[in-house]
Amino acid sequence: MSEDSHSSEHIHSVGSYVKIWAILVVLLIISVIGPELGIQVITLITAFGIAIVKALMVAAKFMHLNVEKRYIWYLLYTGILFIFLFFTGIAPDIMKSEGTNWVKTDAAYIEKSQAIIQDHALHESETHEKEGATHEEHSSH
């Protein structure tokens, strides 16, 4: 095997990995600073947009999908599409705060549930006190 054929097989050099790493670090810094601005659009772009770019860069360069056949990318995109469709299909159900087949455990719902339980316990204790007073009246007769 000649040196030229060996170098053509090994198409990735350390320099290209360092370059990708540096780009990923810069994108990480941008995605951390973006939400600090307090602008919702910037936060969404930096959170999701940059995350997608970083994921594609890692898939292409570190997982070597850039040298694979094109149908591998189609499989990847198809999987991502199915995940998106699954999320959009179930999102209306799981994002509701009311329902009988699940328990929503966000803080506001937990506080509301605890208040209902406390009211119920208070009502029961008042009922027991009234029953106790009625029972005492009947036993004294």
Image (cartoon, rainbow, N blue to C red):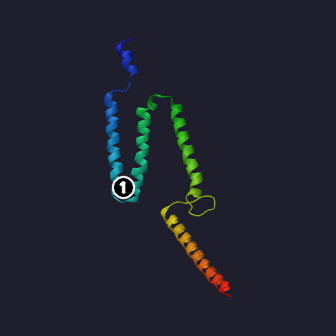
Q: Quadrant of residue 53?
A: top left
Residue at image location 31% in from the left, 33% down from the top: 18
Residue 79 drawn at (x, y percent) = 55, 40
**Residue located beneath label 1 in the image:** 35
Mark 1, other Cα within 10 Å: few <14 / some 14–19 / many ≥20: some
Assign a secondary structure to mark 1: helix
| Quadrant into which the N terminus falls | top left
Residue 51 drawn at (x, y percent) = 42, 45
Residue at image location 40% in from the left, 42% down from the top: 54
Lateral position of residue 40 relative to residue 77, left or right = left
- Closer to us: 96 or 88: 96
How many numbered badges does the structure rendering display? 1
Q: Quadrant of residue 26?
A: top left
Lateral position of residue 104 relative to residue 58, left or right = right
Q: Quadrant of residue 44?
A: bottom left
Residue at image location 34% in from the left, 37% down from the top: 21
Q: Is residue 20 above or below residue 84?
A: above
Q: Is residue 7 above or below residue 109?
A: above
Q: Residue furthest front?
A: 140
- Closer to us: 113 or 48: 113
Residue at image location 59% in from the left, 80% down from the top: 129
Lateral position of residue 54 relative to residue 29, left or right = right
Q: Is residue 47 above or below residue 119?
A: above
| Quadrant into which the C terminus falls | bottom right
Residue 77 drawn at (x, y percent) = 52, 40
The amino acid beneath tag 1 is Pro
